[in-house]
Image (cartoon, rainbow, N blue to C red):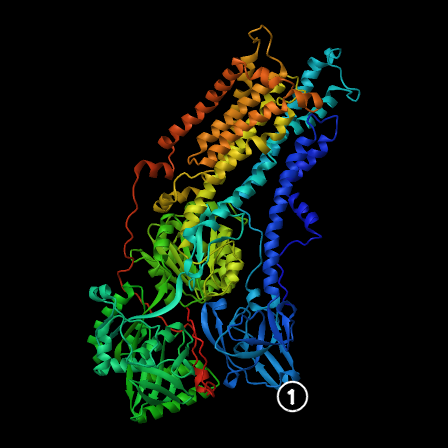
Amino acid sequence: CLLVKTSKYNALNFLPMNLFEQFQRLANAYFLFLLFLQLIPQISSLAWYTTVIPLMVVLSITAVKDAIDDVKRHQNDNQVNNRSVLVIVTEKWMNVQVGDIIKLENNQIVTADILLLSSSEPYSLAYIETAELDGWLSQIKITELGLLFLFFFSGEVRCESPNNKLDRFTGILMYKGKNYILNHDRLILRGCVIRNTDWCYGLVIFTGPDTKVMQNSGKSTFKRTHIDHLMNVLVLWIFLFLGCMCFLLAVGHYIWENNKGYYFQDYLPWEDYVSSSVFSATLMFWSYFIILNTMVPISLYVSVEIIRLGNSFYINWDRKMFYEPKNTPAQARTTTLNEELGQVKYVFSDKTGTLTQNIMIFNKCSINGTLYGMHDDRIRRNKEKVDFSYNKLADPKFSFYDKTLVEAVKRGDRWVHLFFLSLSLCHTVISEEKVEGELVYQAQSPDEGALVTAARNFGFVFRSRTSETIMVVEMGKARIYQLLAILDFSNVRKRMSVIVRTPENRILLFCKGADTIICELLHPSCRSLKDITMDHLDDFASDGLRTLMVAYRELDSAFFQDWSKKHSEACLSLEDRENKISIVYEEIERDLMLLGATAIEDKLQDGVPETILTLNKAKIKIWVLTGDKQETAVNIAYACNIFEDEMDEIFIVEGNNDETVGGELRYEGRTATMKPDSLLESDPVNSYLTTKPQPPFKIPEEVPNGSYGLIINGYSLAHALEGNLELELVRTACMCKGVICCRMTPLQKAQVVELVKKYKKAVTLAIGDGANDVSMIKAAHIGVGISGQEGMQAMLSSDYAFSQFRYLQRLLLVHGRWSYNRMCKFLSYFFYKNFSFTLVHVWYAFYSGFSAQTVYDTWFITFYNLVYTSLPVLGLSLFDQDVNETWSLRFPELYEPGQHNLYFNKKEFVKCLLHGIYSSFVLFFIPMGTVYNSVRKDGKEISDYQSFSLIVQTSLLCVVTMQITLETTYWTMISHVFTWGSLGFYFCVLFFLYSDGLCLLFPDIFQFLGVARNTLNLPQMWLSVILSIILCMLPVIGYQFLKPLFWPVSVDQVSATGIYPNRIHDPLTSRRSAYAFSHKQGFGALITSGKTVKAKLPKRNSFHYKK
């Protein structure tokens, strides 16, 4: 069944399930236990409502938030499940089952793995877009059935069980007594989109979680931040501290009862149920457990949720992350990971559609030693498009800016004509023309499509083909070439060739491929031309363009006939066929005459190089995990500033067994150059690892002696991820500035992310835009989806989503850093104010016989966290900025403290505890010394319990208010209202709760009759408040003054120096192979089989290419 369900609740189970989940939080369960204790009158020294009211507020706010989130999930589920599909009769996708025959139409998304049975195209071909799966667009699916009477279809399919292998499928279809072999070419996978095919019918093979893309998507896990884990540890610490304090106070009560209380029972009689000092001390233990409960603040978690929600809205509302061309805002799809965005150390990025725009542009070319394209300042300044109006079949979307190339074509330059003729013949592109003059090219790679389109615009139009001929319209005249052979591309050959017979009966071989390969096949007479062309390739590579060389050879008829026989024999060979074919290919692909080279721009998204350079300055390491081939990935890495020419060395791991891969990682990489001492027993990391025999353990940071890069392919990675090699891989890779993993499966992407999470104490972020990135996005601490051309699968599985990679720097360096800083300030202040509030009871115990008497009024205890101090700390946590967004982006180094979690950790927590102990000491003994033996003007004493309580709680609120003013670095009107308004609100509530009316109406609940008006006019009270503020603030002010001088962090250094960042330099200076071509075997076999002959004209749909 295809029913999609991502929601957690329904109307019936929401309340019990939500409460069950909330009480799984330690703090909530603790307060529920506390409530039961307060119902026992023998130990309860506080009213039950002091716990019930805050607990109900916390549970209600959290439940409302969870309900809103789940309603959104229900809406998304309904949108997907209620899509219509024709299952012989119209049905909804969620009701489709295995064995159903469904009809798919043009541009329709496929949401199940289906076996193609029939289509509107000749030979039952179906054109599909596979961008969701592998980042490539064009594929062709075929079927040998061509069934027309599907209503009467009755057959049986036997196939493999569900698995995650996207490129493999085996099965048998038994139909009308015949067995049809089923393979991957006949299966349309979930996530594909039907393109340029009016309709097709398919048999549902796998649905829901059994589909291949879902088998690759990985498991969804509940993501929690590092601060969440730290908070749980700190709460346990507080519980232990609370237990110790209660035990010590109970011991103090036991000693006091033995020494004094037992002998003064006439004045302080024991209760009837108290039989001894030990029993009384036991009751006092639980009484103090109730009184000191505010050390574990119940509002902590709900405050954290509100802060995260507010910071999520900032991301959603950020107009600088809004992409106008698609009307797409940034989305925070989760509210639980915001501060984690300020701690990212490793970014794992897909290439296709994430770093690039999936747009291939024919940018420059070199023909017979002459450079054409935007190669000089004059052309760049003018940037006037070439007029292709002389060519009626030109693609109107194609742009070129060098008029000299068109002039060379028009004047009949022999080498220019031969160059573009090569481009129009040497390919495996399939042409469609459903409307006269409107050509649509189906190419196995967008590179091929770009080259054929370029030849088309310059007057050499590839019009159509059969299994034996190719029609090319050359400068307006149709010419038919006989196709004699296609020497198709392979990853080993890195080239492809075609052999054709011209209308003049000449036999020509045209070849294109990697410059490193073609140069070895050239005729010696091409040496000087090769040198010139290689210089041009240097220029192409410096611009980050993808290049290949083009060459040709004229063949003797007798030589070709002899070669053709050898080729036929090799193709019919049953043993070692591929190797024999390769040898035969090499016999004819030699002594080539160089024509020139092409340069294609795999257009990057706007701002990608600058973004990666900025992230590198923030000590964030970028790893590119892609299914694309090595040459393309490396070229993009240079263009994006992941790799730089100034790097000391780039290591390539391409072994095909464990021993070779281990040697490449250990000896050729880490030991030889990066860190020669890394294999010695004396190496600190090795010493550390020897003391950690049992995993899991974290590898400390290792600093290499230079700047390095690493390239590893998927096959070698499969070996590196096994056994002890994974430790070698992560040690070597994490010392590199940039890492490129190519030819990867979706599952391998997730394994690499999990590997770094396993061995490094760092926050990981994965960013991608296709279904092949879902497993990586789910595996990382933070998943970011690009809502691009590869569908919505990645975005729906992500935690954050936006349309352009460049927005990542703003997400991390602005929103992430602000969120982390705010959360750290919040936690530090929150724990401090509660320690200061609660520990006053401990000092008071020494003066009250350890009798569990509270210092404060019961209503003050109820409202302290819920009302009086909630808004100021929320104002700090939602609006504070240590530096503005401009400085955050200008100085990426400010991001580094978050990566090391410097602003809130166990050490900072201990500081908060010590600060709270000191403040509570001042807040108790200053009022005590002020009112001790003091009298009013009229001679009456003021050292009564209620007046003392009011002085202490007023001093406490003034101190914590002043503390938050010192913590706040960015004041807004809302901050002022929250901070000073809360303090003013306290005094208003004070007069209301202590008014004559309330106290007379409810004397058992409101007992502080007239205390406010009698105490607030005392000079001793205001002296106490002022002295408490001064003594509590002086150490804080002194520490804030001395810290930048003796223990500066990056913010302090930037503020002091005002140094501006260096200008971004052009990253590329030296040549490397920028070869780009079809990443897997083309349509050669399909073309020569004759199944691409069209019986009707193609339709209008244009086709968007991507790589």
Q: Which amino acid, mark 1?
A: Gly
Find residue 551 and report its horizontal and vertical position in percent.
Answer: 29, 79
Camera-nearest residue between 307 and 1000 = 1000
Image quadrant occupied by the N terminus: bottom right
Mark 1 surroundings: few (<14), some (14-19) or many (≥20) residues within 10 A: few
Residue located at (37% from left, 38% from top): 1051
Image quadrant occupied by the C terminus: bottom left
Residue located at (35% from left, 78% from top): 452
Residue located at (42% from left, 89% from top): 568
Find residue 896 and report its horizontal and vertical position in percent.
Answer: 40, 44
Element type where label 1 sits in the image: loop
Camera-nearest residue between 524 and 263 = 263
Find residue 805 and report its horizontal and vertical position in percent.
Answer: 41, 57
Q: How many marks?
A: 1
709, above or below 412, in the image: above
Q: Is residue 423 left or right of residue 243?
A: left
Q: Which residue is mark 1?
A: 177
Q: Is residue 958 left or right of residue 176?
A: left
Residue located at (62% from left, 69% from top): 93
261, above or below 584, in the image: above
The picture quadrant where one finds residue 378 is bottom left
Outermost residue, front direction? 997
Q: Is residue 917 left or right of residue 674?
A: right
Q: Is residue 176 left or right of residue 601?
A: right
